[in-house]
């Protein structure tokens, strides 16, 4: 059986340096498939898309809301040519009713332990319209190493620098942050993987730099201590979402190779300032994900916020406009108040105002969004600041003997996964 696994393209943020990380959803999905399946993976963000009407099944892996329009185009063309299409991924869970109009089958939830039945149904000619495993999570012990063999690694480098490999150590999130959909997607309970399995997966990744994509590394102190202690001998360098603000945890994270963290910033509070300083004190960089357009943001406050980021010496900033994604608390609020202005998913890139801000016009919010990018980086572009972060990690790698240059492998591809 042959599957074409497709990761559709999406419009990138105009102000952000364009680079491409190896996608995580497709390699996790590929690992859940039974043996004997020929997988042809295409990431349209890094290579031209080619229709394969000889494939038995097309699997669309869709992470972002703004990927959906392109995913629908591809799926509709396949279905016009009588090639069956199945959808899965985060965006599919958020937009399941709409996706059904473009799919022969929709998979909702986490795939481990479920794909044997799906493939058996397909081979028996009875593929179900919907496989709904939402809130019916697989045994966390069943989650194994992702199938990264499907990736062509030559596509995932930027100016000779190999991009980070993505890996997750846990699923679920107890924090119900207002702009976030994770409570709906992965449940409100923290589900840590056994540390032994996480380490086995990290050891299997040839790349020395990782992105631990857990929603938050701030749930369980004892588990974090066990995880970071086990990670230290690997000498990997890694980034993550927020870390627990605890001296013991931060020291262990730094010793285990934490390079920098993504820290959400939407105010100028002492709490945020202290958190950034404490990360810096442990030698950990901070890339702020700066949310603009909350109800307490007026023009003066946004300008003050950008000045604050410079004052606290934030290493990098990624400015985004608050976006009311389906199933998020903020969307429920804005919808109730009649403030949603657009459901054009192509605009849901976090670079456009698709809602009515409380203290300004949508046009003014977009103007301030562009000003924030330009102002923060006026004394050194984004590439320069990213280069400074890379210089720090290279120095650490040289000291511990793990630094190696990226050498593109000519005439070598991982697109075809072994059966």
Image (spheres, helix red, strand yellow):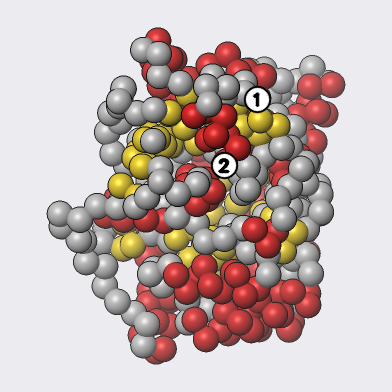
Residue at figure coordinates x 40%, y 46% from the top left: 36
Q: Is residue 72 visible?
A: yes
Q: Which of the two residues, 365 or 286, is positioned nearer the viewer here? A: 286
Q: Residues within 10 Å of mark 1 (few under 14, many from 20)?
A: some
The residue indicated by pointer 2 is 116
- Label 1–label 2 contact, CB within 8 A: no
State which quadrant residue 44 falls in.
Answer: top left
Q: Which of the two labelled residues, at mark 1 and mark 2, occupies the earlier sequence position?
A: 2
Q: Position of residue 41 (x, y in %)?
A: 36, 41
User: Left of 328 or right of it: where is 366?
Assistant: left
Question: What residue appears at the point 58 percent right and 13 percent down from the top-left corner?
Answer: 101
Q: Nearer the viewer, mark 1 or mark 2?
A: 2
Q: Residue at x 53, y 26 (%)?
A: 124
Q: Position of residue 180 (x, y in %)?
A: 72, 42
Q: Position of residue 140 (x, y in %)?
A: 70, 58
Residue 45 figure quarter: top left
- Give the structural element (helix, strand or loop) at label 2: helix
Front position in the image: 64 or 398: 64
- Quarter of the image with the N terminus is top left
Residue receiving disc 1: 130
Q: Tag 1's secondary structure?
A: strand
| Side of 81 relative to 352 (left or right) | left
Residue 268 or residue 130, whichever sits in front? 130
């Amino acid at each position: 059986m042959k599957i074409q696994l497709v990761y559709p393209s999406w419009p990138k943020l105009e102000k952000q340096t364009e680079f491409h990380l190896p996608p995580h959803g497709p390699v996790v999905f590929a690992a859940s498939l039974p043996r004997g399946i020929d997988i042809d993976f295409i990431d349209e963000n890094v290579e031209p898309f080619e229709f394969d009407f000889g494939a038995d099944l097309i699997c669309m892996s869709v992470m972002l809301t703004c990927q959906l329009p392109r995913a629908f185009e591809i799926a509709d063309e396949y279905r016009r040519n009588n090639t069956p299409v199945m959808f899965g991924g985060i965006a599919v869970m958020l937009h399941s009713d709409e996706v059904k109009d473009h799919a022969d089958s929709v998979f909702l939830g986490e795939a481990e332990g479920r794909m044997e039945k799906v493939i058996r149904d397909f081979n028996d000619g009875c593929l179900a319209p919907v496989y709904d495993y939402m809130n019916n999570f697989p045994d966390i012990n069943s989650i194994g190493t992702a199938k990264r063999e499907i990736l062509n690694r030559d596509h995932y480098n930027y100016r000779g620098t190999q991009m980070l490999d993505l890996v997750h150590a846990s699923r679920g999130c107890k924090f119900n942050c207002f702009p976030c959909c994770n409570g709906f997607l992965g449940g409100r309970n923290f589900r840590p993987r056994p540390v032994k399995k996480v380490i086995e997966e990290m050891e299997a990744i040839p790349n020395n730099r990782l992105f631990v994509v857990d929603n938050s590394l701030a749930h369980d102190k004892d588990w974090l201590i066990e995880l970071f202690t086990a990670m230290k001998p690997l000498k990997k360098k890694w980034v993550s979402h927020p870390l627990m603000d605890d001296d013991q945890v931060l020291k262990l994270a730094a010793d285990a190779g934490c390079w920098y963290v993504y820290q959400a910033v939407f105010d100028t509070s002492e709490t945020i300032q202290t958190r950034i300083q404490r990360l810096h004190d442990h030698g950990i960089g901070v890339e702020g994900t700066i949310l603009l357009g909350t109800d307490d943001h007026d023009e003066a406050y946004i300008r003050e916020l950008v000045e604050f980021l410079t004052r606290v010496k934030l290493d990098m900033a990624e400015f985004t406009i608050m976006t009311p994604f389906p199933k998020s608390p903020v969307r429920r609020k804005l919808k109730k108040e009649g403030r949603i202005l657009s459901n054009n998913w192509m605009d849901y890139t976090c670079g456009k105002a698709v809602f009515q801000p409380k203290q300004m016009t949508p046009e003014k919010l977009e103007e301030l969004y562009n000003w924030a990018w330009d102002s923060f980086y006026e004394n050194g572009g984004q590439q320069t600041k990213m280069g400074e972060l890379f210089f720090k990690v290279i120095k650490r790698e040289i000291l511990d003997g793990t630094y190696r240059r990226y050498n593109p492998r000519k005439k070598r591809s991982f697109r075809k996964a072994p059966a």
